[in-house]
């Protein structure tokens, strides 16, 4: 059965057994069962994307127009959450129609797991597909060793969980988590799909939360981390994360990719011993104005030298467009250069981030900026949310810019605008 | 001791030891006893589960929003608030003394928040999760004053917070002289600004046994009215390990 059909069937089942779907909570007493509980949301979303005139994708599009999909269009995302005793499921059905294409449906389970435990012993277990979020940062979470959630999305989205077998032990102020993730995957799967064992230790020490982390990946090997969050006063919270990795997955161009290639030269590769770290803080006043500042380093991101080589290849391909080389081959080689954007979680190693937000009645305006000191690249985001009892409306715009040589200024998108209405039940 | 006997005992104690002229000389123990009696109308046990419905209306009386919470109030200043309304469903706030955590359902990750960040919304989590004055405040008996509707003789208590983490650092509280039920309160934030004025609605005004509603009027910015209805109260003790911040991603059987 296709995932979309499965999710649609789940929706129909929920509709059939939820006679009070219009009420605050749809709870269905089932014979022999405590209760099944359903909740969810439907979100129509309009996306508009402006492609850049510069960068490899912009150049490829200039050489061979129509090569790059628009990205603008309508997306309707329906999310259903169900819970019955120790069983939890969250399913999403997505229908989208992007400019120049027809309707496309897909569905997936964000979570589907069973859990249980013993209150007396303090042990809990979970098995199945589950979101397991770790670490203390906002813009970057080096110690998010299981979920490896995408950060700084324009709209809040429910992540897609990982297949886990998890055991945890809790007492009043200490917690241990032991997780086997992706156990059925091939050991060569990259990034968050790699089979791994991960562990977390947590201890509350008055106003300080202290964490220790350990991960052993099937092919990336050992990794250790530590994090802390400290409430330093009425208004101020400070946090920091650190991680050392023996190896990390990345993408790198093949050694002989000097000229035009017949296949994407960017292939999976491994970066050696690396360090990631983040420091940050949040300040909030009585009027609910909040300021978040973070600085982080990601040693697994492409180095300055790698980006210089990347820029040189872009210039070479651009020059090739003036030669008798087939334009489609040149455009293809330029488009493949965009693979570098997916090499790591961060584009540049050094990152500065500042976010100002305000909550006033139903309104939540926010402004943020991500800045790359290495090349002056910046991403500026403005958003406005309105929250009612059942409806939430969001509008957000993100602009990528900086000097022409900046990596952020060469992304496939120059401006991204999103508008969405979310109805929750 | 049931609530009536307890109130009568405190009343007798107050009558014997607190003549109006010497009211301000009431000892700390006596004020504490009065507060314990007043608390009992909102929280009849140390460990409770309270279903709470919060309705907010604009200054012109039009409805603004409605939120539903399940609040677990436990001994030693521990509270767990589960947001149940569609707009917030899955969010949780854990309060352990002066330390606070928020969990958003998407990330399944407990996040440390500051005391300022817990003052979210028209009814802050402090308003709905703090049901005890005796443990958190000390102060003096100012004297007898008329208050309430219908008007009755009340005892005016001036209270200061004993710890930083409470939502309101100063409370001027009026309790009924006869039954010691809470009647009204002026709630002041850290800067000593009057933040909210509260009125308490009892189940049986002539012989009250419990507070059924708390009516809050914002005095700082929004001028909105908030009605906090205590829909259901049950005695329930949570295991100690369930109040671990990392346990917020679990909470089996709580929702």
Image (tube, coloured by chain):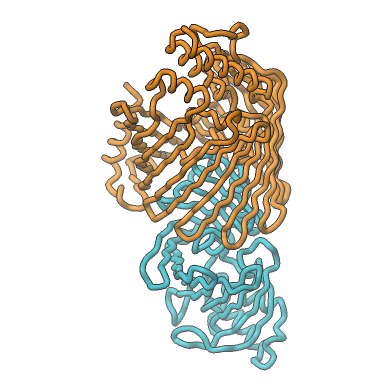
Chain colours: A orange, B cyan
Please tell me in which quadrant of the rendered image residue B52 appears.
bottom left
Identify the image quadrant of the N terminus of chain B.
Answer: bottom right
Q: Is residue A201 above or below residue A341?
A: below
| Position of residue A265 measured from the top left corner of the image (x, y, whole percent) | 55, 11
- At x 32%, y 33%, the residue is A10
| Position of residue A274 measured from the top left corner of the image (x, y, whole percent) | 71, 24
Q: Nearer the viewer, residue B60 or B105?
A: B60
Most distant residue in the bottom direction: B21
Q: Is residue B202 left or right of residue A233?
A: left
Q: Is residue A61 left or right of residue A180?
A: left
Q: Is residue A416 above or below residue A255?
A: below
Most distant residue in the front direction: A322
Give the mark count: 0
Q: Is residue B103 above or below residue A96?
A: below
Q: Could you tell me if residue A187 is visible in this image? A: no
- At x 31%, y 39%, the residue is A14
Q: Nearer the viewer, residue B209 or A320?
A: A320
| Position of residue A140 measured from the top left corner of the image (x, y, whole percent) | 61, 36
Please tell me in which quadrant of the rendered image residue A3 appears.
top left
Q: Nearer the viewer, residue A350 or A358?
A: A350
């Amino acid at each position: 059965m296709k995932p979309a059909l499965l999710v649609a069937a789940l929706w129909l089942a929920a509709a059939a057994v939820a006679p009070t779907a219009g009420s605050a909570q749809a709870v269905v007493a089932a014979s022999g069962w405590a209760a099944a509980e359903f909740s969810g949301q439907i979100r129509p979303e309009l996306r508009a994307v402006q492609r850049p005139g510069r960068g490899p994708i912009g150049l490829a599009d200039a050489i061979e127009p129509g090569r790059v999909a628009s990205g603008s269009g309508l997306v309707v995302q329906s999310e259903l959450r169900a819970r019955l005793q120790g069983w939890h499921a969250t399913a999403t059905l997505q229908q989208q129609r992007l400019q120049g294409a027809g309707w496309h449906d897909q569905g997936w389970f964000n979570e589907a797991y069973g859990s249980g435990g013993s209150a007396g012993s303090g042990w809990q277990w979970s098995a199945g597909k589950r979101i397991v979020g770790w670490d203390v940062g906002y813009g970057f979470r080096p110690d998010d060793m299981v979920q490896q959630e995408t950060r700084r999305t324009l709209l809040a989205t429910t992540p897609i969980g990982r297949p886990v077998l998890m055991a945890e032990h809790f007492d009043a102020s200490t917690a241990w988590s032991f997780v086997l993730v992706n156990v059925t995957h091939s050991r060569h799967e990259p990034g968050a799909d790699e089979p791994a064992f991960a562990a977390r230790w947590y201890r509350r020490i008055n106003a300080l939360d202290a964490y220790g982390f350990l991960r052993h990946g099937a092919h990336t090997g050992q990794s250790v981390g530590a994090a802390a969050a400290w409430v330093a006063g009425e208004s101020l919270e400070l946090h920091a994360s650190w991680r050392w990795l023996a190896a990390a997955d990345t993408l790198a161009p093949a050694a002989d990719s000097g000229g035009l290639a017949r296949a994407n030269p960017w292939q999976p590769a491994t970066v050696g011993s690396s360090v990631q770290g983040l420091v940050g803080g949040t300040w909030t006043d009585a009027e609910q104005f909040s300021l978040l500042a973070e600085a982080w380093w990601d040693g697994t991101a492409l180095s300055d030298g790698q980006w210089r080589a990347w820029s040189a290849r872009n210039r070479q391909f651009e020059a090739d467009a003036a030669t008798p080389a087939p334009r489609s081959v040149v455009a293809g080689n330029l488009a493949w250069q965009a693979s570098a954007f997916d090499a790591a979680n961060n584009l540049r190693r050094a990152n500065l981030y500042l976010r100002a937000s305000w909550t006033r009645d139903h309104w939540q305006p926010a402004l943020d900026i991500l800045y790359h000191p290495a090349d002056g690249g910046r991403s500026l985001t403005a958003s406005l949310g309105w929250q009612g009892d059942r409806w939430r409306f969001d509008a957000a715009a993100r602009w990528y810019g900086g000097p022409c040589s900046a990596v952020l200024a060469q992304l496939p998108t120059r401006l991204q605008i999103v508008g969405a209405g979310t109805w929750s039940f | 001791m049931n609530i009536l006997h307890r109130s009568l005992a405190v009343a007798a104690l107050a009558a014997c030891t607190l003549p109006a002229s010497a009211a301000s000389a009431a000892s700390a123990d006596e004020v504490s006893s009065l507060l314990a009696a007043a608390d009992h109308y909102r929280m009849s046990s140390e460990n409770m589960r309270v279903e709470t419905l919060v309705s907010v209306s604009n200054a012109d009386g039009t409805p603004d929003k409605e939120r539903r919470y399940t609040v677990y109030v436990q001994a030693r200043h521990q509270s767990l608030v589960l947001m149940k309304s569609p707009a917030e469903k899955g969010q949780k706030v854990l309060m352990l003394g002066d330390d606070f955590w928020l969990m958003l359902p998407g990330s399944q990750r407990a996040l440390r928040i500051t005391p300022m960040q817990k003052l979210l919304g028209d009814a802050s989590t402090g308003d709905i999760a703090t049901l005890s004055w005796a443990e958190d405040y000390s102060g003096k008996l100012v004297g007898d004053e008329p208050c309430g509707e219908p008007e009755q003789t009340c005892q005016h208590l001036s209270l200061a917070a004993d710890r930083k983490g409470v939502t309101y650092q100063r409370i001027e509280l009026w309790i009924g002289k006869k039954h010691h039920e809470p009647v009204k309160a002026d709630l002041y934030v850290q800067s000593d600004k009057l933040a909210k004025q509260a009125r308490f609605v009892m189940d049986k005004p002539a012989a009250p046994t419990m507070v059924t509603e708390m009516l809050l009027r914002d005095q700082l910015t929004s001028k909105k009215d908030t009605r906090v209805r205590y829909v259901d109260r049950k005695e329930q003790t949570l295991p100690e390990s369930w109040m671990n911040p990392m346990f917020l991603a679990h909470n089996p059987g709580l929702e």
